[in-house]
Amino acid sequence: MKIYVVLDNIRSAYNVGSIFRTCDGAGDCEVIICGISPTPEHSKVEKTSLGSTKTVPWRYFKTTDEAATYLMEKGVPIYSIEVTDKAERYTEVEYPQEVAIVLGHETEGVNRHILDSSDKHIIVPMNGKKESLNVATVAGIVIYEIIKHKN
């Protein structure tokens, strides 16, 4: 099992660092950093990750489209986490052995072009007044749901 965690222009270095820590805890994840998302060289990423940037493999792409092409060429299905009409509840999705999950910009969400080329859209449903959770929180919820079904 391998989970590719694609960061589609995540602007907060703290969110990126937190996602690295979650990936370290989950195991067998690779972080794919795209666009404006801060890389591990950023001091705030390193501070929040508590060294997990050294234990979790990562790579950087200038655009999320380049990352998607890389994943498609490897035959990895791409599941975007976004509120859309096509979105399925994260607990009701069948996750393959290898999967990429795309997490979007904190206010803009996942890039429309990436959504259009994704194999699935998934959602973490909300019961409160807000439309969505913090991106790092959603990453943790979905990553651990995926590994729950693989163990």
Image: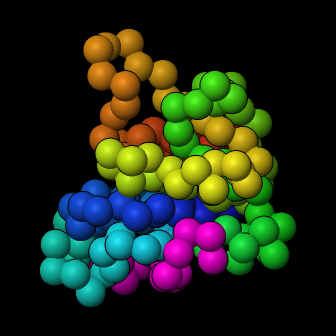
Between 90 and 67, the one lying in front of the other is 67
Q: Give the residue displayed 49% in from the left and 82% down from the top.
A: 62
Between 16 and 129, the one lying in front of the other is 129
Residue 129 image position (x, y, % from top left): 29, 14
Q: Which quadrant of the figure contains the N terminus?
A: bottom right
Residue 50 image position (x, y, % from top left): 22, 71
Please say if 13 is above or below 94.
below
Quarter occupied by residue 17: bottom left
- The magenta segment: 51-66
Tell me if I can see residue 141 in this picture.
Answer: yes
Residue 88 image position (x, y, % from top left): 66, 27
Query: Which residue ends up furthest to the front in the rendered image?
Result: 112
Tell whether 143 sits left or right of 114: left
Tell me if I can see residue 148 in this picture.
Answer: no
Quarter occupied by residue 122: top right
Queried whether the magenta region covers residue 145, the answer comes back as no
Please say if 60 is above or below 142.
below
Query: Which residue ends up furthest to the bottom in the rendered image?
Result: 41
Please say if 73 is above or below 98.
below
Q: Give the residue displayed 70% in from the left and 49% down from the top.
A: 116
Please say if 129 is above or below 119.
above
Queried whether the magenta region covers residue 52, the answer comes back as yes
Q: Give the residue displayed 16% in from the left and 80% down from the top.
A: 43
Between 15 and 105, the one lying in front of the other is 105
Q: Give the residue displayed 72% in from the left and 42% down from the top.
A: 120
Residue 128 image position (x, y, % from top left): 31, 13
